[in-house]
Amino acid sequence: MPEPTTQIDQRPIKKVERGFEAVLFNSRWLMAPFYFGLVVALAVMLYKFVLELGHFITHASAAKEADIILGALSLIDLSLTGNLILIVVFSGYENFVSRIDPGGHPDWPEWMTKVDFAGLKQKLLASIVAISAIQVLKAFMALDTAVNTEKLMWLAGVHLVFVVSTLLMALSDRWGSDKGGGH
């Protein structure tokens, strides 16, 4: 007589596993409100940009050359920060929530559906370095009014940290992709 084997029915376990995986997979939609919040932040940035632009225009006739440059740098700073928000919104949504269908949108920027996570990191870090550089430049431009060397040193130091971090991240991504590609 053959010995009875004790075999556990795997169907209920697989059903629980699939259910758990479905919950994990669908949890990506919890990120959608974060991206919507960033769109609201972009609208606030636009409001601030319009205020800065109005101030820039109304005070231009009495402003010194350095003030004009500082005003322009402030507008550039706000623009770059807005770009940074857009990069995070589109790339983050595309990479972590759901694909965006660019079909039917002839003016859709090419990069929006092509930025992977490594590219997102690079774009973010490059934007942060540019924003940081503008802050340092603004501080240097304001040297004739008040010299706060400690603040200037901190700004330059933080900017240097961003630059080095970006360089190291780019090298790390390159080395990782070289190893992954079999080179």
Image (cartoon, rainbow, N blue to C red):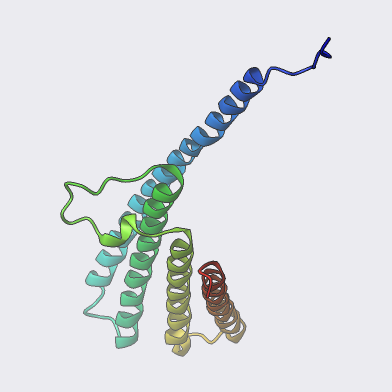
In which image quadrant can residue 8 be found?
Answer: top right
Q: Residue at x 33, y 66 (%)?
A: 79
Q: Is residue 169 depicted above or below 108 in this figure?
A: below
- Left or right, 107 with reference to 50: left
Q: Residue furthest front?
A: 1
Q: Residue at x 45, y 79 (%)?
A: 133
Q: Position of residue 1 (x, y in %)?
A: 84, 9
In which image quadrant can residue 59 be found?
Answer: bottom left
Q: Residue at x 62, y 24 (%)?
A: 14
Q: Position of residue 67 (x, y in %)?
A: 33, 81
Q: Nearer the viewer, residue 156 or 121?
A: 121
Q: Position of residue 12 (x, y in %)?
A: 64, 18
Q: Residue at x 31, y 76 (%)?
A: 72
Q: Is residue 39 depicted above or below 18 in this figure?
A: below
Q: Nearer the viewer, residue 113 or 136?
A: 113
Q: Is residue 28 depicted above or below 180 in this figure?
A: above
Instruction: Give the number of marks.
Output: 0
Q: Residue furthest top?
A: 1
Q: Position of residue 178 (x, y in %)?
A: 52, 73
Q: Residue furthest bottom?
A: 144
